[in-house]
Amino acid sequence: MSLRDLAVATIASILFGVASMEHSGENYFSSKGNCRRRHEKNTLSERIVNGTDAEQGNWPWMVGLYNENDTLHCGGVLISDQFVLTAAHCFPNESTSFISVRMGSINISNSTDCSGETTRLHTSQRSDEPEGNAAPNGPVVCAEVEDICVPLQEHCSFFMEDIAIVKLKRPVNITNHIQPISLPENCDEPSLIAATYIAGWGLAYDIDIIDNEAFEDDDDTADKEVNVITFSPSTLCQRNITLINKTACQNQFSTNVPHYILCSTGGSCSGDSGGPLVYESNGAWFLVGIHSGGDKNCSWPEAPGLHIKVSYFVSKLIMPFMGLSNNSQTKKTDICATDKDRIQCVTKLYGAYSGSV
């Protein structure tokens, strides 16, 4: 094999081919039951690690969680006008009031983007208007956190139940650029061959393969160098990934993997935690998992990604917590870990984790 062929094969081995999703040409959102439809044409390919930059409106359920330093902390996913799912390890401290939940834009934002009327959208930007009438980049809608719930934990380790549901202080307006995604309740889970996607603002990388010898020197590959350049993208990145069956996943980690864990091919990195794993079925988009983590060497070579299976927590955590404000007899302590237990568990997770979470 020539060095030129080797370079091409090396790049191809870590990058996914382009995956296209064809949808209706209509430019509005509709729903089938609780299952959201995204009526747009979009093409997805290679870079979250390594995918492509997302376009405005690609993932209207995507949210960013920002810390007290106005820095992107984690991703998240909108599941209703007042509730967000993310990873439990995104809340390692006692106070959660510092978190700013931002949505409506694919760009990294700062607190000044939240000022004035950006938190309330004009009626001309509501979801029943054509996409062309909405702001092309979408206003940044910022919300404060009222409460969070992390499940009661049996194992505070590498495979903790790393999911959290966040209640916003106020409902957000549903617009062209802000749409909740459907939970997997009463909806089919994707097969292992289904096209699944992740999105996030986490670290990405570029690969530069350098040959110190001429390409025509077919016999000498010793001087090939691979340079991996990591960077933080300024816009949302997206990627098609593939689910891995449980046996293969357990072989990868040489240990048993709990049934609430989904494994996938790589493609995520530091900063992508809490983001959604999604798939499309008959034009409707469904939430499959919440990204938890992966190997710390998230660029070269790629390692399996870990996602928390949302369907396992719909009746156990999500719906009970969402119903607490509806005069439910369920108490928060029946379903949610205390702040002390949450902090202890997340601390143990960070200690057990060999990767970037």
Image (spheres, rainbow, N blue to C red):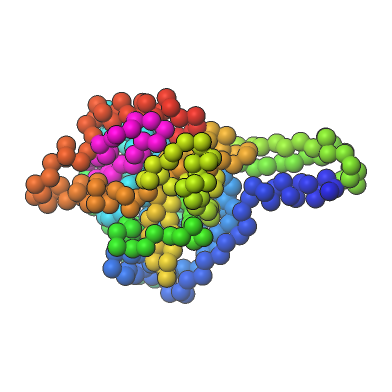
Residue 27 lies in quadrant: bottom left
Q: Which residue corresponds to the image point at 14% horizontal and 48% vertical from the top-left?
A: 325
Q: Is residue 114 above or below residue 183?
A: above
In terms of depth relative to the viewer, which is nearer, 179 or 33?
A: 33
Q: Position of residue 283 (x, y in %)?
A: 42, 69
Does residue 62 appear anywhere in the picture?
no
Does residue 33 appear anywhere in the picture?
yes
Q: Position of residue 189 (x, y in %)?
A: 39, 59
Residue 122 lies in quadrant: bottom left
Q: Is residue 117 above or below residue 66?
A: below
Q: Position of residue 304 (x, y in %)?
A: 53, 43
Q: Position of residue 294 (x, y in %)?
A: 50, 38
Residue 165 is covered by the magenta coloring: yes
Q: Which residue corresponds to the image point at 61% horizontal and 60% vertical from the top-left?
A: 18
> In the current view of this chain or complex, which residue is farthest to the bottom?
25
Q: How many marks?
A: 0
Q: Which residue corresponds to the image point at 57% horizontal and 51% vertical from the top-left?
A: 51
Residue 225 lies in quadrant: top right
Q: Which residue corresponds to the image point at 51% horizontal and 36% vertical from the top-left?
A: 254
- Location of the C terminus by quadrant is top left
Residue 44 is covered by the magenta coloring: no
From the viewer's perspective, is 221 left or right of 19?
right
Q: Is residue 327 above or below residue 294?
A: below
| Segment tinted magenta in the rendering | 144-168
In terms of depth relative to the viewer, which is nearer, 136 or 102?
A: 102
